[in-house]
Amino acid sequence: MGRPSAVSAPDYSKATDAKDFLDQIGQIVYEKVHGEAKNYVSELKGDLSKATYPKDKRPEGSTPKDPCELQYDYNTNVTHGFGQEYPCETDIVERFSDKQGAQCDKKKIKCKKDIDNECGACAPYRRLHVCVRNLENINDYSKINNTHNLLVEVCLAAKYEGASITRYHDQHKRTNPDSQLCTELARSFADIGDIVRGKDLYLGDNRKDREQRKKLEKNLKTIFENIQSSNVELKRLPLDELREDWWEENREKIWKAITCNAGGGKYFRNTCGDVKRPTPTNEKCQCINFSVPTYFDYVPQYLRWFEEWAEDFCRKRKHRLKDVRKICRGEGGKERYCSGDGHGFDCTKTVRAKGIYAISNECTKCAIWCRPYKRWLENQKQEFEKQKKKFENEIRHRNRRKRDISTNNEGYDRKFYEEIQRNFEGVNKFLDLLKNETECKGITNKEEGIINFNEDHEVKGTFYHSQYCEPCPECGVKEVTFEEKEIDTEGKCKVEDIYKPEGKKIEEIKIISFGDKPEEIKKKIELFCNKSVEESRREELHEVWNCYYDVKGGACALEKKEGEKKVKKQKTFNDFFYFYIGRVLNDYIEWREKLGKCLQNGKAIKCGKNCKDDCGCFKRWVEQKKEEWGKIKVHFDKQDFGSRVGILGGLLTPDFVLEQVLELEQLFQSIQDAYQNGKAIEGIKQTLQKRKNQETNNADDTVKRNTIDLLFEHELQEAEQCKQKHNNCQDPQPSTPAGGRSATP
C-alpha cells in the first residue's frame, strides 16, 4: 500500500475554509508522527488474516483480508451474546438531526482542569452514537492480546459506523444538499482514532452511557498493556505512545473499513498521490494507492468539533430562518409584515409611538416561532463562546504546559500546536475561516444576520435574530409596500387614537403580568413564587386594562408608569384577546421549563422541597389565570355576534367565535410545530387531543369547553398531582457515619 511522499510546508493563507486549514495542518503532523512510528512497524502493524479465535472450532485462517467482508457475529472475539457484539447501539438511531444539537455539558465532556473548568468542547450530534459497542463489550482480554485481533474489532466498529453514517446521510442530503459523505466519514474516522488512542473527550449522555465509556477505555488500556507485555521492543515505549503508533500503522485498513459502503462521494480536497500534484479520491472516498485521504485524525478533537459545530449551526440557522421568514412575512416575503417580539403585532396597524398595538392570528404565530428561534440563537452563542474560549486557553497555556511535560506523551496534540504557533496568526484567523464553511457562505442578507464569527454578533451579525423578530417601526408600515409610515413636522406619527370610550361603560380587567421577554418572565415568576397569596396579587405583578364595548367590539387601554415616563397602550378588544392568550402561552412554556424534572407526564421524577414549592406556586398561577379568563369571557360574551338564526343558527355562540374566528386550535398547533414537540408543550399536545376527543364524542354544547378552558383544566390537574406526589416523596435520609455501631448492647 502506498503512502504520500513527504509534504513541504503548505501555504495556510490559501486555505479555503476552516476544514481545509485543519486538514492541512493535520497532514504536516501526520508526516512527523509517521516518521516516529515506522520504528515499530513489524510489532504493531495488524494483519486481518492472522487474527485468531481461541476455543473456536476454527481458531485460525477464517478472517478475510478485506475488512469489508468482516461479519460482526462471526469474525469477533466478543462473546457476550444477545447481539452485544453488534457495534452499533441500534439500527434506528438517527445520525443527523435538524432538531437535536451538540452536547456541551461539562458532565458529558472531559475537561482539562488546569485551563478550562467549563470544558469548552461541544460533541456534535453525529458523535453521540458512534458504533463502538463491540469494543465496550469485550469480556475476555486473553482473546485479544495481539495487534491482529485488536485490528479486527476496530475494523468491525469502523465498518458498521461507516454503514450507519452512509445510510442516514442519504436522507440527510435531501434537505442538506451541500453535505459531503466523505467529510462525515472522516469525522467519525478521527473520533474512532481518538477512542483507540485514549483521547476521546465525550463521556456519554447519561450515567449508564458514561459507565460504558469508562468500560471501553479500561478495555482498550488493558488490551494495549497485553500487546506491550508480549514484546520486548514495545516495553520501551510509554503506553500513550504505543497507542499513537498502533493507530498510525493501522489507519489505512480502518479507513477502508469505514468507507466500505461509501458511494458517489469525494473528499473535499485533493490529497491522494504525489503531494506536488495531488489527485482526488475515487467515488468511494478512497485513494487509488489505498492511502488515507483525510488528516482529521491528527487535529485535536475539540477543534474538529468546533469546525463541525459551525457548519451545523449555519445549516440549522438557514432552515429555522426559512420557517420564521415564511410565518412572519408569508410566502415570498410580501404577504404580511409582522413583528416577532412579544405577541406578534401587525405592523400595518400598529403604532408603537401612540401605544396602538394590533394583533392578528398570523402575527401571533410569528411571535410564537420567533421565541424559540431567539432562544436557540442565544444557546448557540453560548456554545460558540465556550469553544472560542477553549481554543484561546489552549494556545495561551501551550508554552507553560510544554515546559511541564518531560515525556513525549501528548502525541499529535503537541505537534499540532507547535505547527500552529509557527505558522498561524492566532484564533481570529481561524474564526475568519469558519465563515467560509460551505453552509455559511452566501449568508449575506443584513436583515437576517450576516455570518461572521470574528465580528460583533449582535448588530445584524451571526447571532442576530433577524428583522422578522424585531418590534414594528415606531409609526408602523404602509400596507402593500411595507414602507415605514411618515411622521409629521412635529416628529409625531400621523394616526388617530382608537380608544374613545365617551359614554361607554368601562370594565376593569386585572391580569397577572410577567412581561414579554423570557428573562423578564423568569424573574417575575420567581417574584410571584416568593410572595404570599395576597402579596402575589399586588400591583407590581399586574396590569389593569380598562375596556369598553360597542357594536364594533370595543377597545382596551393600559396606562402605567415606567420610571418617570407614562406609557399608554391601546388595543381593540379582539387584539386584547390575542394579547392575553399570547401571554398565557408564553408564561405557560416558561412554567413548564421551570418545573422541568419535577414532573414529566404526570410522574414526579425528582423529590425535594423545591419541587413541592414550585408545583404549589404553579397551581396558584393557574388558578389566578383561570379567574382572569372567566372575567374576559364574560366581557367577550357581551359582544354582538350577529343573528342566532339562519344557516349557522345557534352555532354563532361566543365559544364558536372564540374557536373558529380566533382559530385557537391552529394557534396551539403552531406552538407545537415551533417548539418541535419539546417537553415544555406536553400540556398543549394533550389539550389538543382532548379537544379532538370532545369533537369526536359530539358532546352537548353546554358541556363543551373551549381550548383555553381545557388547557387550564389540564394544568390544574397536573399541578395538583405534582404537589401530591412531592408531598409523598421520601426526603433523603442522612447516611450512617462509617464504622458506626448501634448503641444497643
Image (cartoon, helix red, strand yellow):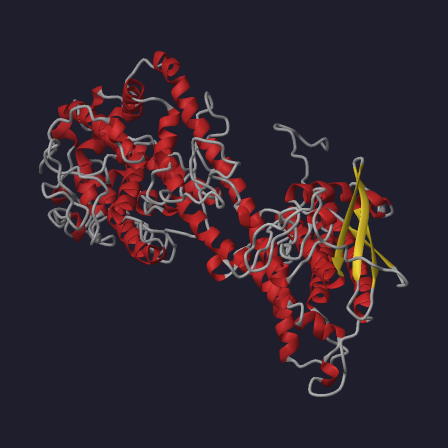
> Does residue 606 appear in the picture of this structure?
no
- Residue that appears at 57% across and 48% down: 469
Q: Which image quarter holds the N terminus?
A: top left
Tell me if 423 is positioned left or right of 510 in this view: left
> Does residue 194 appear in the picture of this structure?
yes
Of 132 and 516, the residue lying toward us: 516
Q: Is residue 713 above or below residue 251?
A: below
Extreme-bottom residue of the structure: 646
Extreme-top residue of the structure: 403
Tell me if 26 is positioned left or right of 609 in this view: left
User: What is the number of callouts on the image?
Assistant: 0
Of 640 and 398, the residue lying toward us: 640
Tell me if 90 is positioned left or right of 239 in this view: right
Of 194 and 548, the residue lying toward us: 548
Of 612 and 6, the residue lying toward us: 6
Residue 571 x/y as whole percent: 74, 57
Residue 404 x/y as whole percent: 37, 13
Residue 177 x/y as whole percent: 31, 53
Q: Is residue 726 above or below residue 673?
A: above
Res. 153 image quadrant: top left
Q: Which image quarter holds the C terminus?
A: top right
Extreme-front residue of the structure: 489
Res. 158 image quadrant: top left
Residue 573 x/y as whole percent: 76, 62
- Residue that appears at 88% across and 60% down: 502
Tell me if 334 is positioned left or right of 722 in this view: left
